[in-house]
Image (tube, helix red, strand yellow):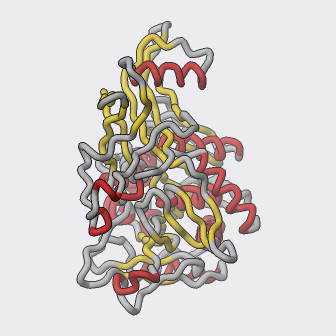
Amino acid sequence: MSQTSFNKRLFKFLKHSPTPFHASDTIAGRLQQNGFRLLSENEQWPEKMHGGYCCIRDDGSLLAWKTSDSNSPDTPWRMTVAHTDSPALQIKPLPETRTAAYTSLGVEVYGGPLLSTWFDRDLGIAGRVSLLTEKDTLCIRLLDFKRNLVTIPSLAIHLNRKANDGLKIDKQKQLLPILCQMDKELSFHDIIRRQLQKQYPDLAVKKILGFDLFCYDTQPPAFVGLNKEFITGSRLDNLVSCFVGMEALVQKNISGNCLLLCSNHEEIGSASVAGAHGNFLRSALQRIQPKLFREGPSLGASLLISMDNAHALHPNHAEKHDPGHTPLLNHGPVIKHNANQRYATTCRSTALYKIIAEEAGIFPQEFVMRSDMPCGSTIGPIGATDLGIQTIDVGVPSLAMHSIRETTGTKDPFLLFKTIARFYRRNSLPLVIQ
Ligand SMILES: [Zn+2]
């Protein structure tokens, strides 16, 4: 696959994945097209597993794996993890808010977005809805209005002369997206119901019971720069990594035990039914290899690559980086280090990763936070802690992380893909260092 066709597919994936639920659904679709079987946690799983499988929990987290024919607890695992969620504005359960002749929607802040970037954007609404049908069946349906539906206008500078001196945003009062201008009362549930009818003409909805709906930027991803050297788009953190993992796993020529976890709720701490602090991965592994945690030496000989975007040096804020660790866009994936294990990278996992990357012709960049600034974290340390598996934190270099529109290098997603593709293919790699 060339970088051009890879990026074309990446853009399509980003467009089809406005929420974690859509991302999981899109990934499951791609996996199934490539022979993976979708399993439900509520059914018996095959006793002998050969080939590819995937499973979705709570609509927003997806686990996919390929097992070797022997599938013995001695076979090492090559695992990657990423997250499906991104900071956003989530619609409140009873959101209708009327001021003068405007109807706005109450929102909660999900995760840690750069809030100022959400103003003056054309926003869509998407997510999932739980409902009761006329036949009294309970079901969940994905919803996406796929159009510009709301906007949060800034206050004109003439009405706030201090707006450029550091804007403080009142999350309760100033973040409400405006939906429409009309005199009569309107029900958000009715709007959802109409959209469901449009998307699912055969679905007879008796009652809407709940929803997780988010505002999202409708502007598609784009190439920017004199030589188109940058990619800008929404939710690059961390859908780029989900896409990389998915594309690497559907390669034809991989064998051994390979796994990809795309987890929801990373941006809010991972403690949830579907989050990485939950038991999704562990309980699935127990079902895939019942002896794994009792007598399998395989986890000790395995490697987990945690993929999440890294901070590239920002030319306007170079002082924010440690001078010796300044990742650049288009120079490929970054290994993230932290002495306090906020990143799970160790000396051992670094060695293993570097061997794999260099076999793919890629020389990793290295990142460590300035010593006088706190460090973020990822799913990496959670996986390392729970499974006792060597783990490394890596990611594509990016700018404006948690903005509604982030930036990465045009080459970087493909370079990460080449590394992960090599990792999944390289089943004879010694994953233990003597
Ligand atoms: Zn992230």
Report x, y in % for residue 72. Answer: 54, 55
In-front residue for pair 311/123: 123
Q: Which residue does the image show at 38% across and 60% down from the upper left? A: 379
Q: Which residue does the image show at 44% across and 43% down from the upper left? A: 151
- The quadrant of the image that shows the C terminus is bottom left
Which residue appears farthest toward the front when viewing the image? 158
- Ligand 1's image quarter is bottom left
Q: Is residue 55 above or below residue 297?
A: above
Q: Which residue does the image show at 64% across and 46% down from the upper left? A: 31
Report x, y in % for residue 52. Answer: 63, 47
Q: Is residue 38 above or below residue 192?
A: below
In-front residue for pair 417/288: 417
Could you tell me if residue 304 is visible in this image?
Answer: no
Q: Is residue 392 above or below residue 290?
A: below
Could you tell me if residue 286 is visible in this image?
Answer: yes
Report x, y in % for residue 29. Answer: 64, 41
Q: Which residue does the image show at 68% across and 62% down from the upper left? A: 7
In-front residue for pair 121/193: 121
Q: Quadrant of residue 391?
A: bottom left
Q: Is residue 230 above or below residue 369?
A: above
Q: Quadrant of residue 330?
A: bottom right
Report x, y in % for residue 89. Answer: 37, 45
